[in-house]
């Protein structure tokens, strides 16, 4: 990081960034914050039929300190919202957030006193996956989009 | 010679209190346990549910009768058809139309309930075996589950949450060729289950972790209100399909597996055997499936066919009335129950004569089991929470509603 | 099928049993709340109802008494099922706890308390179960608005609806 700042914005830093981002996107460590029915589709995506390991995102690190992709799977209600915020704050930069399913994106069809209407009310989100629950192919498509986003990450700007 | 027990007399130890938090892989995401430890031994446990409370009852009080089916799906989301069937049965009792539902709809409900039972047991055992350490079993179980999900997708259109039954029948008929697909899935599943039996039944590590761990006695289980495989693992024979038969379980020839000790190994084994019995029921029921309509023929309950809607004025008005206002259920209260893979799932519904329910209460089978966990786990080690909790098959959607 | 249970209840507790019915195959008895514990002990010890299947509260808002607590009981040895209901007025929303009779009633009563505000006398540990302790109000009452929000941590962007 210090090296990049010293060199400034020229072709050496872009090449370094290219290789670092290439390494990052093909080895995403995910933190699945699984709560509800979308967890069943998440299990299907991780297993043999719709293999997620072929994209490099095999290891689910169940600790925020070691992961860089937060997958919020399922409904988030007001009781668990502080935990989600804490987990997000404990993750180290750079980090990306994917909101998996309709309930995590907007609250789904639960519009009442208990459910948080979308996790973007408490943490910033990069990719939203609609569906109730989304098909595994949609999840794989979202992963390819996240990989594109990771490739375009610029260290000097921090996004 | 100093013995180790002498040295520990002067150690000032304290109890350690940790939070086995809601976002933990072994907690299946949604339960917090406040655990007080003495070294590795559990001194006291306090189970804290509610991290998936989505306001199911409040939502159902605000939605019409046919709209509530989608909420019932998400209760026990690994076996959604059974929730739909129980809800539809309860409302049909209130309407008094149980005898008029077409036979084909009832047979299809029963067959798909058994497929859902298989997917539920597969998911529960996949999680339990993976957390004990056998990751291979997780992949094998989910592989079988994918075959059954494909069958269900062929019939109902969705993989996980189907919303397939309606009040008066089912949404649409099963397509041609589903029987061969279902028989093929059952035929492919049996050898894989046999492999898993070979991996776990006599595996020394699995036996050490599950036999005589998580014991519960019959009297305790009944005092807490536990039903289902958890109760049957203690040796008590209560299965709603045999005690209060519904649909066509009377005509089916199947057994109810019972455990011996009431420990984790019994729960694993009871679930494995129940899957085999469900496959037997499916094989017996498929040849008996009659042909015919799948929805009751009553204009107050069922949507008319599209040709009538587009050509006759009565069809248009009928369609409009049902879409805008839905059905009206006469006043009354009913408690209707079925055998879900976790135990007795009951719906207590009160209607005051309008098109929305007044009270929709679900009796969740895993609620009393979670209540008994502090007593089961007291004195065991922290690593024993994992297989015990896996054997409970706590589904957050049903537990917290 | 369980009509004999209702007959025995009526014989033994004439003034406590207010009404009974048998609609939809569910035998139901409405009893006075003062004699609840006595009736439950009778049902468990003498009629053999080993398991309390379910306990829930109901809010009949315009009617008085407003609340109702409903118990579903099951007997394995004799195959009976019965539903017992107790009406509770709003001003004095208190009823005896049945935890001395069935251990399993503990969590059900906690849930009924946090959603309706009905207190259970003699309950060992009456606190919230499914909702968080800072929650205000009783959500399942009919006068609690459906879409009221009570966020637990401050939100990044305010709600648009």
Image (tube, coloured by chain):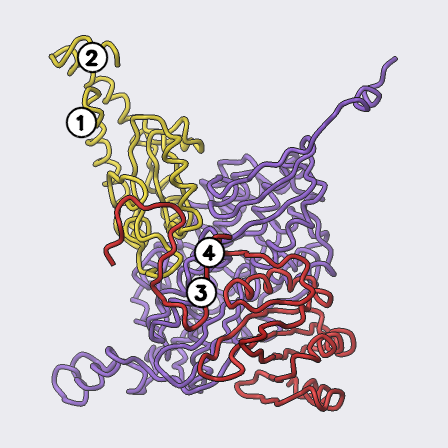
Chain colours: A yellow, B purple, C red
- Label 4 Cα crowd, 10 Å radius (few <14 / some 14-19 / many 20+): some
Where residue A101 appears, as percent x and y from the top left, is 31, 49
The residue under label 4 is C135
Which of the two labelled residues, at mark 2 and mark 1, occupies the earlier sequence position? 2
Of all chains, the one bearing label 4 is: C
Q: CA distance from mark 4 to mark 3?
A: 9 Å
The residue under label 1 is A152
Residue at the location (50% across, 72% down)? B347
Dots 2, 3 in contact, CB < 8 A? no
> SS for tag 2?
helix
Q: CA distance from mark 2 to mark 3?
A: 55 Å
Where residue C103 appears, as percent x and y from the top left, is 69, 62
The residue under label 2 is A5
Task: State which quarter of the image contains the N terminus of chain B.
Answer: top right
The residue under label 3 is C139
* Res A47 seen here: no
Q: Nearer the viewer, residue C155 or A43?
A: C155
Dots 4, 3 in contact, CB < 8 A? yes
């Amino acid at each position: 990081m210090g090296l990049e700042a010293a060199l400034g914005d020229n072709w050496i830093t872009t090449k370094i960034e290219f290789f670092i981002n290439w390494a990052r996107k093909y080895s995403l460590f995910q933190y699945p914050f699984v709560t509800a029915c979308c967890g069943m589709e998440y299990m299907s995506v991780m297993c043999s039929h719709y293999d997620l390991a072929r994209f490099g995102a095999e290891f689910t690190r169940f600790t925020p300190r070691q992961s860089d992709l937060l997958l919020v799977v399922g409904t988030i209600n007001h009781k668990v919202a502080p935990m989600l915020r804490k987990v997000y704050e404990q993750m180290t930069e750079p980090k990306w957030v994917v909101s998996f399913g309709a309930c995590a994106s907007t609250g789904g069809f639960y519009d009442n006193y208990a459910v948080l209407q979308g996790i973007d009310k408490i943490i910033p989100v990069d990719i939203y996956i609609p569906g109730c629950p989304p098909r595994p192919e949609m999840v794989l498509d979202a992963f390819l989009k996240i990989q594109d986003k990771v490739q375009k990450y610029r260290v000097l700007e921090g996004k | 010679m100093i013995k180790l027990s002498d040295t520990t007399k002067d150690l000032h130890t304290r109890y350690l209190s940790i939070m086995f938090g809601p976002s933990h892989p072994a907690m299946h995401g949604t339960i917090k346990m406040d655990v007080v430890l003495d070294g590795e031994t559990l001194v006291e446990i306090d189970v804290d549910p509610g991290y998936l409370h989505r306001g199911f009852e409040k939502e159902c009080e605000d939605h019409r009768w046919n709209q509530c089916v989608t909420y019932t799906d998400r209760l026990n989301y690994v076996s959604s058809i059974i929730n739909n069937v129980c809800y539809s049965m309860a409302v049909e009792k209130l309407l008094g139309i149980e005898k008029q539902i077409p036979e084909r709809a009832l047979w299809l409900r029963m067959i798909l309930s058994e497929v859902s039972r298989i997917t539920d047991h597969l998911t529960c055992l996949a999680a339990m075996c993976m957390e004990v350490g056998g990751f291979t079993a997780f992949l094998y179980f989910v592989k079988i589950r994918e075959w059954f999900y494909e069958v269900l997708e062929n019939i109902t259109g969705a993989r996980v949450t189907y919303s397939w039954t309606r009040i008066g029948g089912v949404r649409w008929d099963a397509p041609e060729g589903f029987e061969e697909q279902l028989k093929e899935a059952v035929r492919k599943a049996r050898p894989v289950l046999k492999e898993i039996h070979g991996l776990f039944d006599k595996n020394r590590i699995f036996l050490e972790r599950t036999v005589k761990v998580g014991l519960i006695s019959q009297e305790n289980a009944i005092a807490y209100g536990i039903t289902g495989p958890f109760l049957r693992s203690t040796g008590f024979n209560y299965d709603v399909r045999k005690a209060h038969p519904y649909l066509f379980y009377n005509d089916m020839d199947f057994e109810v597996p019972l455990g011996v000790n009431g420990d984790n190994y019994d729960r694993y084994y009871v679930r494995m055997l129940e899957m085999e019995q469900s496959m037997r029921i499916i094989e017996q029921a498929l040849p008996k499936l009659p042909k015919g309509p799948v929805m009751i023929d009553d204009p107050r309950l069922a949507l008319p066919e599209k040709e009538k809607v587009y050509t006759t004025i009565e069809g248009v008005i009928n369609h409009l009335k049902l879409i805008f206002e839905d059905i009206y259920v006469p006043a009354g209260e009913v408690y209707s129950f079925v055998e879900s893979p976790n135990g007795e799932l009951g719906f207590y519904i009160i209607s005051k004569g309008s098109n929305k329910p007044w009270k929709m209460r679900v009796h969740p089978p895993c609620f009393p089991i979670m209540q008994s966990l502090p007593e089961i786990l007291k004195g065991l080690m922290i690593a024993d929470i994992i297989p015990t909790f896996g054997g409970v098959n706590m589904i957050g959607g049903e537990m917290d509603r | 099928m369980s009509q004999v249970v209702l007959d025995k209840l009526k014989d033994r507790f004439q003034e406590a049993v207010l009404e009974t019915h048998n609609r939809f195959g569910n035998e139901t008895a409405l009893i006075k709340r003062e004699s609840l514990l006595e009736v439950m002990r009778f049902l468990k010890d003498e009629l053999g109802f080993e398991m309390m299947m379910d306990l829930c509260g109901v809010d009949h808002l315009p009617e008085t008494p407003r609340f109702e607590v409903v118990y579903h009981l099951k007997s394995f040895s004799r195959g009976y099922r019965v539903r017992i209901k107790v009406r509770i007025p709003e001003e004095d929303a208190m009823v005896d706890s049945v935890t001395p009779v069935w251990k399993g009633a503990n969590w059900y009563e906690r849930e009924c308390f946090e959603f309706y505000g009905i207190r259970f006398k003699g309950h060992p540990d009456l606190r919230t179960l499914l909702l968080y302790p800072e929650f205000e109000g009783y959500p399942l009452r009919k006068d609690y608005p459906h879409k009221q929000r009570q966020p637990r941590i401050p939100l990044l962007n305010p709600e648009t609806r």
